[in-house]
Amino acid sequence: MKTWTCRDRRPLLDRGFFLKVEDHTVALPDGRVIADWPVVITPDYVNILARTTEQRFIFFRQHKYMAPGMTLSPPGGYLDPGEAPLAAARRELREETGYADGEWIHLGSFVVDSNRGCGNAHLYLALDVRKDAEPSSDDLEDQEMVQLTRDEVERALAENACAIVSAAALIALGLRTIDARSTSSGPCADRINPGVRF
């Protein structure tokens, strides 16, 4: 299958680490050329569905600038330059919550906007995490850390209490993975990866 090809790019806006915008000249498989295709470049980020040894899921109740009202958000944040996604996920969880260790499962890496870019979301499930430090987050938002039961997490998802698409996707993928692991048997039961294969 033929793909779109970038023939040229030119910068439109450079706000440093957090935001760049470019115009691309894009050639389509049928020969048409689009001269001004805007592409948004933002840093990759991680989100973590973390479940404690007490079977509670860690979230924050907070206001996000572009999300309506109060929302439930999972721990997470931007990758530092050159940082691997798993290392960023472990760092962000410890910084924001004080929890660490546990078993880590990569749920997938996803393009945020398939036509414009906007970075990639790297989603992780962390099971049996334990508190080993006090949080040392530099987040700008006022936030309250909460620990929810499985039923409370499912209700929050059903009631759109998670107003951020990556958070909703994280919860759905994470709960699906937990369920698949609990119904599987055999030596590979702990290696289930729900990533889509074509």
Image: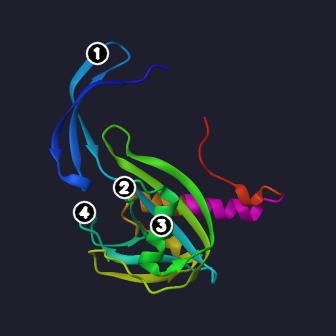
Q: Amino acid at mark 4?
A: Met
- Mark 4 vs mark 3: in front: 4
What colour scheme does the image use? rainbow
The disc, 4 or 2, on the residue closer to the chain's N-terminal end is 4
Q: Residue furthest front?
A: 82
Q: Which residue is mark 4?
A: 66
Q: CA distance from mark 4 to mark 2?
A: 25 Å
Contact flag, marks 1 and 3 (Cβ < 8 Å): no
Relative to 46, 23 lies left or right: left
Few, some or many C-alpha atoms within 10 Å of disc 1 (few <14, some 14-19, many ≥20)? few
Residue under circle 2?
81
Tell me where residue 98 appears, x and y as whole percent: 48, 81
> Element under label 1?
loop
Tell me the distance, in whole angstroms, between the alpha carbons under discs 1 and 3. 42 Å
User: Around disc 3, counting alpha carbons within 10 Å, would you say few (fewer than 14), some (14 to 19), or many (20 or more)?
Assistant: some
Tell me the quarter of the picture where residue 96 sits: bottom left
Q: Amino acid at mark 1?
A: Arg
Mark nearest the camera among 4 and 2 is 2
Q: Quadrant of residue 69?
A: bottom left
